[in-house]
Amino acid sequence: MRIIVGADEAGVDYKDRIMADLEADSRITEVIDIGVNRADEDFTRPYPYVGIAAGEMIRDGKADRAILFCGTGIGVAIAANKVPGIRATAAHDSFSVERSIRSNDCQVLTMGQRVVGVELARRLAKEWIGYAFDPSSGSAAKVKVLSDFEGC
């Protein structure tokens, strides 16, 4: 699995921590850091650019999934969802993380550094990458409605 990590300045610490976990996970073949990073000139780049960039990379086949961070997780989720064909969600508990994949085939998980403890964020990221969507499940027809609406 190729996975993107990204954040705005309000989520950069969690991005860096989760990125280290993902790089050590044998299920991940590539971790793609789209910033921001503290050393970047554009360290204060707003969250919409991060969410949209991640969505476009997934749409274009450059990555399979993304885990994004901002202050609440809401902003980067909204931004990623603006890219046709992308399903992103903010999730803060194990059941929602599981259902984001199994029921909704989400490609993007977002979390907020200001609202989720770091150990919980690490756990949720690890759980999330372990789930797979079953295209023969009862949820597949629901996901198809969304894809058909978008024309994807």
Image: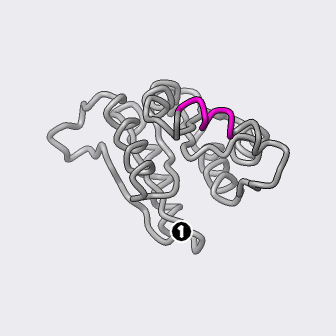
The prevailing secondary structure element of the residues shown in magenta is: helix
Quick one: 52 or 27, which is closer to the camera? Answer: 52
Residue at 43% from the left image edge and 35% from the top image edge: 83
Q: Residue furthest bottom?
A: 26
Residue 139 in percent (x, y) is at: 79, 42
State the extent of the magenta-drawn residues as a range: 144-150
Residue 2 in percent (x, y) is at: 48, 63
Q: How many marks?
A: 1
Residue 36 in percent (x, y) is at: 30, 43
Residue 145 counted in the magenta span: yes
- Tell me: residue 29, above or below residue 72: below
Residue at 44% from the left image edge and 29% from the top image edge: 82
Quarter of the image with the N terminus is: bottom right
- Tell me: residue 31, above or below residue 128: below
Quick one: 81 or 41, which is closer to the camera? Answer: 81
Classify mark 1: helix, strand or loop: loop
Q: Residue furthest right?
A: 138
Residue at 54% from the left image edge and 37% from the top image edge: 110
| Colouring of the image | one colour
Query: In the picture provided, is 74 more to the left or to the right than 100?
Result: left
Query: In the picture provided, is 91 more to the left or to the right than 10?
Result: right
Three-letter residue code for mark 1: Ile
Residue 38 counted in the magenta span: no
- Tell me: residue 35, above or below residue 2: above
The residue tagged 1 is 28
- Tell me: residue 71, above or below residue 43: above
Query: In the picture provided, is 13 more to the left or to the right than 97?
Result: left
Residue 13 in percent (x, y) is at: 41, 43
Give the quadrant of residue 44: top left
- Classify mark 1: residues with Cα within 10 Å, few (<14), some (14-19) or many (20+): few
